[in-house]
Image (spheres, rainbow, N blue to C red):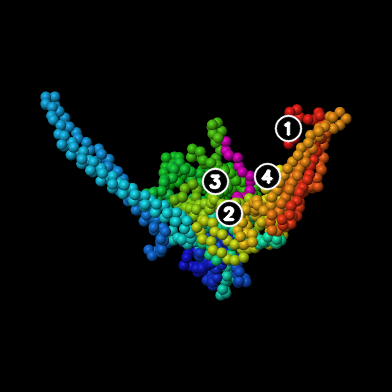
Amino acid sequence: MTAQSAQRWGSTLDSVVVYAQGAVCRRLARGSAAPDGRVRVTGLPRSLDPGSLRARVLSAPGVRVTEARVEVEAEPRGTGTPDESRREFERLSDEYAAAQGHRDRQLSLIEEVRALHPVAPARRREDPYRSTPVDAWLELADFVDERLTGLRNRLAEAEEALRNVEHDLTVAADRLDRATTDAPSAHVETEVCAVLVLDGTGDAEVELELEYGVPGAVWVPAYRLAYRQGDGSGRLVLRASVAQRTGEDWTGVRIALATADLRRRTDLPRLRSIRIGRSQPVPTPSGWREPPAGLVDLFSGYDAAGPGPATTAAPAPSAAPVAVGAGFASAGAAGGSASGPVPPPPPPLPGYGGPSAPQGFGPAPEVFGGGTPALAPPAGVPQGRRPRTGSRSFAGAPAAMAPAASDRSAPPPPPAPAAGPPQPSGAELDYAALVLCGPDEQGGRRGRLFPDSPFDPVAAEYRRRAEAVAALSLPGQAVRPRESAGSFDHRFDATARADIPSDGTWHTVTVGEIPVGLRTEYLCVPSVEQTVFATLVLSNATDQALLAGPVEVTVDDDFLLTAALPTLAPGGVRRVGLGPAEGIRVTRRTNLHESTSGLRNNTTVLDHRVHVELANRLARPVTVEVRERVPVTSEPDVRIEERADWTAPDEGTGPDRHAPGTRVWRRDLPAGATAAFDGGYEIRIPTGKALAGGNRRS
């Protein structure tokens, strides 16, 4: 199908789903198809994955897509096409090269002038001594000094100009590197098209939807939290930092963010049954047929005509075997040339080759280049179960022939694979992508169909530049969604359309508002630090998880700080620290009294007393949680008796898990009020369990 035989439809990018790495784009196209149903949809990016293209019909009942593939069109760019960034970079590159050459010329001139020095003429033995011309020496020294002074001044000017041009070139290179990759290249304009074949179009207008995957897109979550003191709820706005270099600008598209891995497998595993016996299930027919017998005879006249004109291609090895049916005919084993007449093939193996195989030729030894030589079945073997054997050539002998019995050094023949019909791969069954190899192909490829999969260096370069986005440094306190999502995947749909250029830098997109429950609590651990810290207790009442990321906290319309929000599962409750609360004071005093008890004073009693005072200097009531610790023991003889009104908290999980022996006081303090807590515990240690010289007071 050529570009003239298919109608060209334009397309618009409608929505994008950004995954943990990579994205899936959705385009819409509309038009009336030709009677043959062939359509070319333009506007696709250069970095798309050709195997991810999907197409379906939206608004025409009875119309379906029967074929979809990707093609690339290239044509020279016009002279009037604007490309200011690249043109400026090339101009500065030329100026830099010229300035560097001018500087190098000045350096070479300085070295030449510096090398000037007087040389006295050679004196013969019989010649008398001559007087030194001092004036000439001084004139030469003055000339060298004057010349070097001027050259050094020019060198300083050249180096200054070189530094200026180098700075401008660095700025232009950075601007070109950060520019959007949606612009075409410097000299060739490429256009990626989706070639579709529609069935049942008629005269109706058809609307198509195209989906394809592209690399080079990443995102990380970010939040903005606004609340007022005293309220039980707040506004948590989910935002996302998105960076993409897919080769197309996302302008006015619907954005969705997903935590899943785009490259993971989605096909379901298939468990096959194990059967014992001769009766086996019939394999599903694939539509593949073996190449016809005697295919090599088609090129006998071409080979007999002699070598063609010399080309730049590397010649094939003279001893390379050419596959012919069940055996090989070595083109150079007997001293002949590859372009000369092909010698007759060896006779067929006993029991192989039926009467329908002329001159002992069996079926073709390769199945679209990916299979193994298939021989005619022996007597008694059903037609549907052909044995297959590998092909290997040594010393120009037929691969299917066994070595002579007297040749003890010859390697044994390779083991034959399991009997059965050849199994072509999926690429070999894509008949529209198969290419017929010409007569110049070697190694049994000529005259046969092979998958056409040439390496596209331009597309590989686009994908390499796109995948470099994954190495971007993350914003402060940001966490990649694949790390914070855990074992589950989530998707967040933005409420409004957004614009994200293909420049490989972070852009902020507002996703939506999430209702959360909020309450402010104050926490202090005076045994570690006598400071009260303010915390926000967040409760997630939605059915979606909140991923870890930075959160900008705003209290009463005043920005407070940027904190790290942990991952909050649906229905979960977590704390977010807001820093020290200067309006609440805490003081802690301890007292230790050591004594003995028991009939023989054989038990040491360590009486610990703790006194904690709180003072609320804020203009509103607060809830303060004071945490203390009590020693824990694994010895049954050592007893710990508590004397306080504190309580043991729940164990918790993850970061909220409390250490063993933690005790908690909770108190509601009105504005300007104070409170005191008294607690303590006794440690009773038998004399036999006491540590000699140990510190028992802490």
Q: Is residue 476 magenta?
A: no
Give the amino acid type for the residue marked by disc 1 in the picture.
Answer: Asn
User: Looking at the picture, does residue 198 appear above or below residue 308?
Assistant: below
- The magenta segment is 412-429
SS state under label 1: loop
Of the image marks 4 and 1, the number of the one nearer the N terminus? 4
Q: Residue at x 55, y 66 (%)?
A: 252
- Camera-near label (2 vs 1) is 1
Of the image marks 3 and 4, the number of the one nearer the N terminus? 3
CA gap between label 2 and label 4 equals: 43 Å
- Residue 554 placed where, x, y %? 62, 59
Of the image marks 2 and 4, the number of the one nearer the N terminus? 2
- Residue 410 placed where, x, y %? 54, 34
Q: Residue at x 31, y 49 (%)?
A: 157
CA gap between label 4 and label 1 equals: 22 Å
Of the image marks 3 and 2, the number of the one nearer the N terminus? 2
Asked if the residue under mark 4 is in contact with the one under mark 3, i.e. CB atoms within 8 Å, the reply is: no
Q: Residue at x 63, y 57 (%)?
A: 553
Q: Is residue 428 magenta?
A: yes
Residue 326's disc number: 3
**Residue identified by numbered label 2:** 21
